[in-house]
Image (cartoon, rainbow, N blue to C red):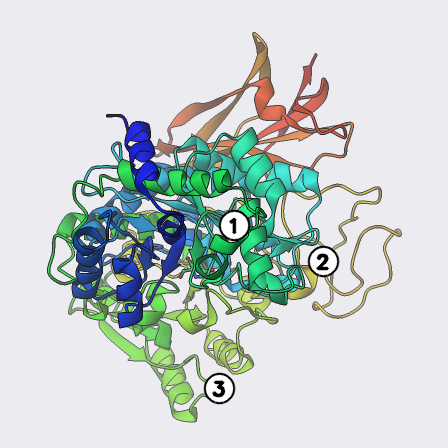
């Protein structure tokens, strides 16, 4: 029997109440809920870590409910289960879809035996505001990069066969526009015009749907006055009718009920009606569906066919996962030991996620034969902080910190002087400061670990200021004044505003929250066993006053005129030419999207564009002019010079990771199809428009030379 036949057969035996039960999801393993499972009134359990409790609920559902429909067990496995990989923003900085897919595969293989066959990942919300704590969970600001990362994660979690016991269903979230939250404040309103919604925010979701994602999660936010969890335009018209999505949509945690607080629904009954009619098939945590769908169907406010569609979609995923054949957890208890090959993968991904932002006079890599090295900063030895947000299942003893890894790397010949200064605490002790200064002055060099710990990142962890705490910066300045070589490693879940560090400290490496193997990965780079290859997936602003600051902005009628500021930021200048500028800050970023250095230099030859059928062949010669082998993320950007609506100043269209031996030259080549130039027009149609374009093959969003081409 085909899956569709099995669904139909099952559906024909279900009462309305049992159908509604499939649309209900809870996280609580209370006795009352166990009884609901027995009555067939719960379809999914989530975020229960105790494998025995999961097994018991699953057993009750299969053995004691009338139809024996298995539960779908979900969990937030966001960047690894037992083996923790870098936060998704860090993974995106690797621009390595192959590694990202492998990491998702490893996470699926680790968690599936515990009975969890569904993760609430990938988060593919475009984020242009680093104040938003959840920027850590996504791929940053660009739709092409986020699409590539999201699709890679979907492939990794779901594998080639969803019914394989090592595969789990993925969930692209939060549909849609959650990342456009005003002011970077979580759960806030998002105001997105339809064209931007389609050309920017929806793109990565479409990529996940094309990659076969099983489920989507509706967001907490509203868009244009309609909550995302009650939005028939996005959930029905776009997702089902235009994209032909055949999996199911789950709400976010109580987001159906919250439509009352939004001022969109008068009560829970109306919230159940709006959510269901809009296309949210399963309600997470709140019980509007359980409490009201039956009477809404009886009164004719919700057609029976809509309930059947929702249940069909949920059962489809349960059948595809093979839950009717095998749903019980295979292991008695989690967590279990991480595998060596997974740890090696985590190390490699963490290494490729690091971005070298500055390396004056080739200070890095450090030699391994120093007499002494000061390692300053609590973040050098804080397992939880290097893991970052959303990792319930980490096992802290597994985590290898930078301090331990630096000690291992240099061996006994180098004295490593560690001082736990720069802690993420309101006041810092004088003794720690003095000890940090003393350790640096008596060492050959210092590595400072700065940034933000896990408690400053993730859901509901938004920041109005992105600076280092004042007392941290004071100490950094004092250490810098000693005249020793100083390297800063930034441990962070988001871009921070670090103008003084960026201008004064000679070497700066961003490691994000790098995960279980973050320590060894950082040491691999600090001492040159490997060369950095990461590039920024998001713009680093100079000050929060510039936000939102993203590379693919519009030009305006009066674009900024860049002037060389001779005064510190915050000091007003005279106005420059009545253009789109600030009086007291530059308009350029501290570090642009796509930027990242390595231990060798790359020269980019001129970009050339040639016609190839109806497409364009864009090429440039790329040469490693340094003395070390490196891997470079080569990026293709395009600008549509005049459109029926204004077009961004640059848009990333494609990228490649190319390895080059010292002195080696290669031709980087991209095929640009008309479809790659498509966008939504004023009349709502989608496609490319004839006219003049520029293309850059570039090391980042600001570099490279432009070639012109014409689409006729
Ligand atoms: C709320 C978050 O917004 C969502 O991303 C997460 O998956 C759910 N809670 C479940 O924990």
Q: Position of residue 490 (x, y in %)?
A: 43, 64
Looking at this rendering, what residue extends furthest in the front direction? 298
Which is nearer the N-term, disc 2 or disc 3? Answer: 3
Q: Position of residue 138 (x, y in %)?
A: 47, 51
Foreground residue, 627 or 72?
A: 72
Label 1, residues with CA under 10 Å away: few <14, some 14-19, many ≥20: few
Could you give the CA–CA distance between mark 1 and mark 2, rounded to whole angstroms? 62 Å
Q: Pointer 1: what residue?
A: 298
Could you give the CA–CA distance between mark 1 and mark 3, rounded to whole angstroms? 58 Å
Label 1 or label 3, whichever lies nearer to me, is: 1
Q: Which label number is shown at residue 586?
A: 2
Q: Secondary structure at mark 1?
A: helix
Give the position of the N terminus as an image quadrant: top left
Label 1 or label 2, whichever lies nearer to me, is: 1
> Compared with residue 371, is residue 224 higher up or lower down, i.e. above or below?
above
Residue under the image location 33 percent in, 73 percent down = 375
- Residue 303 left/right relative to 158: right
Q: Secondary structure at mark 3?
A: loop
Residue under the image location 73 percent in, 67 percent down = 567
> Compared with residue 334, is residue 670 higher up or lower down, i.e. above or below?
above
Mark 1 CB within 8 Å of ligand 1: no
Residue under the image location 76 percent in, 30 percent down = 682
Q: Secondary structure at mark 2?
A: loop
> Compared with residue 585, is residue 143 higher up or lower down, i.e. above or below?
above
Which is nearer the N-term, disc 1 or disc 2? Answer: 1
Which is nearer the N-term, disc 1 or disc 3? Answer: 1
- Residue 141 left/right relative to 61: right
Evaluate whether residue 135 shows in this view.
Answer: yes
Give the position of the C terminus as an image quadrant: top right
Q: Pointer 3: what residue?
A: 426
Q: Which label number is shown at residue 632?
A: none
């Amino acid at each position: 029997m085909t899956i569709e036949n099995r669904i139909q057969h099952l559906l024909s035996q279900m009462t309305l109440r049992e159908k509604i039960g499939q649309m209900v999801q809870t996280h609580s393993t209370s006795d009352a809920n166990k009884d609901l499972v027995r009555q067939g009134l719960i379809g999914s359990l989530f975020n229960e870590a105790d494998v025995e409790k999961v097994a018991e609920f699953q057993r009750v559902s299969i053995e004691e409910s009338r139809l024996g429909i298995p539960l779908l067990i979900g969990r937030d496995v966001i960047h690894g289960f037992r083996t923790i990989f870098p936060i998704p923003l860090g993974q995106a900085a690797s621009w390595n879809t192959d590694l990202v897919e492998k990491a998702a595969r490893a996470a699926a293989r680790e968690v599936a035996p515990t009975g969890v066959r569904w993760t609430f990942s990938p988060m593919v919300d475009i984020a242009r505001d680093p104040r938003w704590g959840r920027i850590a969970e996504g791929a940053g600001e660009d739709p092409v990069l986020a699409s590539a990362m999201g699709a890679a994660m979907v492939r990794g979690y779901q594998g080639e066969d969803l019914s394989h016991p090592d595969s789990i269903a993925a969930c692209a979230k939060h549909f849609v526009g959650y990342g456009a939250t005003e002011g970077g404040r979580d759960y806030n309103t998002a105001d997105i015009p339809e064209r931007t919604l389609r050309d920017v925010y929806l793109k990565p979701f479409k990529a996940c749907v094309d990659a076969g994602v099983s489920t989507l999660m509706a967001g907490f936010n509203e868009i244009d006055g309609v909550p995302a969890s009650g939005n028939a335009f996005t959930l029905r018209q776009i997702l089902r009718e235009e994209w032909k999505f055949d999996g199911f949509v789950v709400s976010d945690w109580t987001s159906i009920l919250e439509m009352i607080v939004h001022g969109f629904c008068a009560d829970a009954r109306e919230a159940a009606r709006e959510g269901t009619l809009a296309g949210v098939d399963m309600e997470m945590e709140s019980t509007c569906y359980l409490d009201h769908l039956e009477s809404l169907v009886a009164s004719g406010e919700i057609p029976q066919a809509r309930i059947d569609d929702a249940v069909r979609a949920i059962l489809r995923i349960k059948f595809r996962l093979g839950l009717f054949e095998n749903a019980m957890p295979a292991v008695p208890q989690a967590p279990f030991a991480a595998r060596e090959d997974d740890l090696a993968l985590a190390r490699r991904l963490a290494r490729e996620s690091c971005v070298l932002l500055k390396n004056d006079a080739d200070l890095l890599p450090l030699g391994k034969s120093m007499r002494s090295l000061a390692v300053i900063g609590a973040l050098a030895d804080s397992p939880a902080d290097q893991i970052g947000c959303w990792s319930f299942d980490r096992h802290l003893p597994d985590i290898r910190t930078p301090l331990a890894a630096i000690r291992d790397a240099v061996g006994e010949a180098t004295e490593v002087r560690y001082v736990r200064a720069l802690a993420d605490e309101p006041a810092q002790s004088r003794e720690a400061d003095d000890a940090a200064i003393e350790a640096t002055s008596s060492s050959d060099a210092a590595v400072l670990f700065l940034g933000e710990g896990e408690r400053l990142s993730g859901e509901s962890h938004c920041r109005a200021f992105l600076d280092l705490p004042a007392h941290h910066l004071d100490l950094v300045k004092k250490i810098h004044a000693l005249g020793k070589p100083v390297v800063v490693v930034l441990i962070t879940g988001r871009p921070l505003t670090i103008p003084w560090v960026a201008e004064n400290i000679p070497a700066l490496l961003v490691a994000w929250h790098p995960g279980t193997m973050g320590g060894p990965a950082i040491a691999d780079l600090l001492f040159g066993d490997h060369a950095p290859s990461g590039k920024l997936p998001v713009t680093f602003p100079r000050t929060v006053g510039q936000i939102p600051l993203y590379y693919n902005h519009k030009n305006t009628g009066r674009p900024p005129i860049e002037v060389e500021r001779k005064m510190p930021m915050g000091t007003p200048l005279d106005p420059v030419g009545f253009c789109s500028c600030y009086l007291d800050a530059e308009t350029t970023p501290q570090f642009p999207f796509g930027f990242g250095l390595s231990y060798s230099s790359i020269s980019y030859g001129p970009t050339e564009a040639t016609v190839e059928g109806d497409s364009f062949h864009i090429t440039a010669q790329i040469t490693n002019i340094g003395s070390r082998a490196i891997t470079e993320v080569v990026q293709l950007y395009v600008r549509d010079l005049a459109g029926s609506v204004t077009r961004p100043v640059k848009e990333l269209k494609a990228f490649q990771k190319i390895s080059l031996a010292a002195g080696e030259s290669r031709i980087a080549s991209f095929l640009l199809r008309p479809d790659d130039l498509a966008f939504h027009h004023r009349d709502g149609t989608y496609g490319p428009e004839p006219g003049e374009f520029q293309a850059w093959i570039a090391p980042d969003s600001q570099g490279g030379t432009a070639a012109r081409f014409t689409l006729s």
